[in-house]
Image (cartoon, helix red, strand yellow):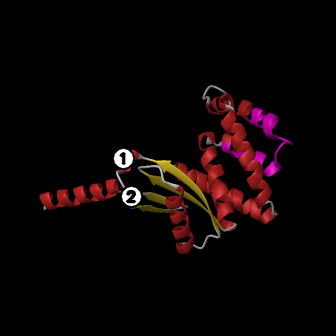
Amino acid sequence: MAKLVSQTYGEALVELANEEGIASSMLEEIQSVREIIKDNPEFVKLMLHPGIAKQEKLQVVDKVFKDKVSDQLTGLIRIIVENERFKDIDSVFQYYIDKVKESQGIGVVYVTTPLELDDKEKSNIVARLLETTDYKSLEMNYAIDKSLIGGMIVQIGDRYVDSSIRNRLDDLTKELLQIQLG
């Protein structure tokens, strides 16, 4: 559900920013607002608190953001608060960031491996991805998940490739269960 919410609001913001020719400046604003929200957990608690009236939350949004960021971004934040979707604001922002970077030919890649990769392995992954995609450059994000055992998971946008040993073992287990049931 959160994916649908982020996609709905994010796509609306992408269309608005493209129509008004402010995609790049909106990207900078969103990154700044995202940092402000991340650095102020009390603000997040306030926005998520069920005992605080929506109208009060909207007044806080206006006080914090009005005349400091574009009216379009303030309006989006107000709509998110009005629809009680503040918990999804980071995923909305991430959707927008990913879409704008994609339109600029920058791929945002998430690579998960069971062990830390050295620089040579990282550069091999980047080279291979640049060969197999249409991106001009890549923004790489690496994570470690020891439960993968071996292999890796690569995600670029909505494309997801899981070549981990854990995934292969899960598939093998399912096949064996099918044989036993059959």
Q: Quadrant of residue 65?
A: top right
- Report the quarter where the C terminus lies: bottom left
Which residue appears farthest toward the top when viewing the image? 51
Residue under the point 63% across and 29% down: 45
Question: Which residue in the protein does label 1 denote?
Answer: 147
Q: Quadrant of residue 167?
A: bottom left
Identify residue type, mark 2: Gly
**Does 140 appear above or below 31?**
below
Circle 2/circle 1 CB separation < 8 Å: no
Question: Which residue in the protein does label 2 denote?
Answer: 151
The percent position of residue 23, horizontal first and vertical second, equals 76, 60
Dominant secondary structure of the magenta stretch?
A: helix
The percent position of residue 122, horizontal first and vertical second, equals 53, 59
Which residue appears farthest toward the right when viewing the image? 67
Magenta range: 58-80
Residue under the point 13% across and 58% down: 180
**Does 52 appear above or below 70?**
above
- The span from disc 2 to disc 1 (Cα, nearest Å) is 11 Å
The percent position of residue 166, horizontal first and vertical second, equals 33, 53
80 relative to 113 in the view: left or right: right
Residue 72 visible in the picture: yes
122 relative to 79 in the view: left or right: left
The percent position of residue 59, horizontal first and vertical second, equals 78, 33
Residue under the point 62% across and 33% down: 48
Task: Rate crowding at label 2 as few (under 14), some (14 to 19) or many (20 or more) other CA atoms within 10 Å.
Answer: some
Identify residue type, mark 1: Ser
Element on which disc 2 rests: loop
